[in-house]
Image (cartoon, rainbow, N blue to C red):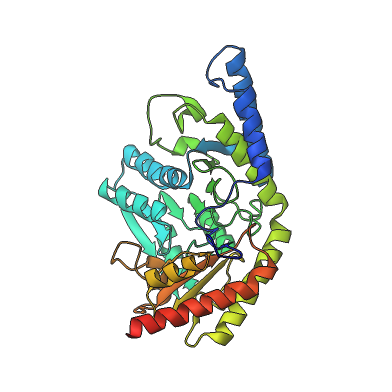
Amino acid sequence: MQGIAEPIYLDHAATTPVRAEVIAAMSQCHAEDFGNPSSGHAWGRRARHRLERARTAAATALGIPAAHVFFTRGGTESDNLAVLGRARHAIARGGGAPLVVTSSIEHPAVFEAAEQAAEEGARHAVIGFGDGVLDLDALKAAVRQGPAVVSCMWVNNEVGLQLPIAAISKLCREHAVVLHSDAVQAVGKVPLALRDNPVDLLTVTGHKIHGPTGTGALIATNPTGLQPLQFGGGQERGVRPGTEDVAGAVGLAEALRLAVEEVEAESTRLGTIRDAVQARLAARVADLRINGEGLPRAPHILSLGIPGTDSDTLLAALDARGIAASGGSACASGSSAPSRTLATLYPGETAATLRLSFGHLNRARQVDRIVDSVTTAIERTRDFVRR
């Protein structure tokens, strides 16, 4: 990016750079313990030992038993395994079409898994929002039907909205209903406190917390209630067959450890940066909407509704100024389908959306440049659209 003084990465909600500590842990594993953990010889035994140490480390970071950790290849697979795996298990048991319940703002990995379950004989109930708040009365009515699984994300990936997991968990516990939560955007940004907010199934992934891409885990308190999505091996106690990625598990565990250890300080730091950018942009840009303003939000995401602009042009203008961001716009990239999250929170709105997501690469000294660059990009995009 020749001529750009300081490129700034503001797309941490999409993916994050791998931390040096994670690279070091994985490199040692690649060099010393490359064996297949299912093999009975010394190389295999060493790999198995390192895999189980990673499982214990991940569990310790989350405050759960190691037996509840099942390594996967990422958040999408974990979400699919939780939702579709639960639905298929219920379908196989017979007794009518099982119910799968999700919120209306779930990640596609959850929402589309629920839709696939409906294609296979289940029913999919969608819980909406009123004034940005999950309709707990509707959820209570759905839970009383004894669904196979309820899936509500911890933190929304588009606007950072925090769902009321404590209330959802309490409701599901009262009716003995299995609860899944996609915590991909929550880990390292907000305290999970799983002892106070118990869930039966939890999705985490590496690349959102400065760990390796293609790594993840499904935390499952009762894996016998899941039907696996893959077949052909007994790895991960049959829940996720396939040769384990030992180095990936090591990297994920180290990233989880660091994220949980640093969550309080990092949450405060990112919230301070986010709030400063938000306040200054609101003062300088006419008609700017802060998506989710006034609602509980995670500290690392700032979603902006910007009338009179075009997302693609706006992002190109920012990229030219060395700012990496994402649209998260009312229309999904390459599709005319509206974002479920924005359609839920702002029905009928057509404003372009800009998502700025903060992380380890960001510093308070960048705030002025971020605000200046975004303001200029919006002004130029509005001028372009008006022509």
172 and 385: which one is in front?
A: 385
Is residue 290 in view? no
> What percent of the width, then of the height, locates residue 227?
40, 36
Whether 291 is drawn above or below 27: the answer is below
Q: Nearer the viewer, residue 105 or 7?
A: 7
In this rendering, does residue 241 appear at all? yes
Q: Residue at x 64, y 72 (%)?
A: 367
Labels in figure, total: 0
Relative image position of residue 81 (x, y in whole percent):
43, 42
User: In the image shown, does 41 or 56 lie closer to the viewer?
Assistant: 41
Q: Nearer the viewer, residue 77 or 360?
A: 360
Q: In the rendered view, would you say 232 is above or below 360?
A: above
* Residue 306 in picture, x, y percent from top left: 44, 79
> Is 112 placed above or below 376 here?
above
Residue drawn 55% across the image and 22% down it: 37
Residue occupying the point 43% across, 47% down: 76
Is residue 21 found left or right of 324 in the rendered image? right
Q: What residue is drawn where x is 34% and y is 81%?
A: 385
Q: Quadrant of residue 343?
A: bottom left
Q: Is residue 87 above or below residue 382?
A: above
Residue furthest top as drawn:
41
Quarter of the C terminus within the rendering: bottom left
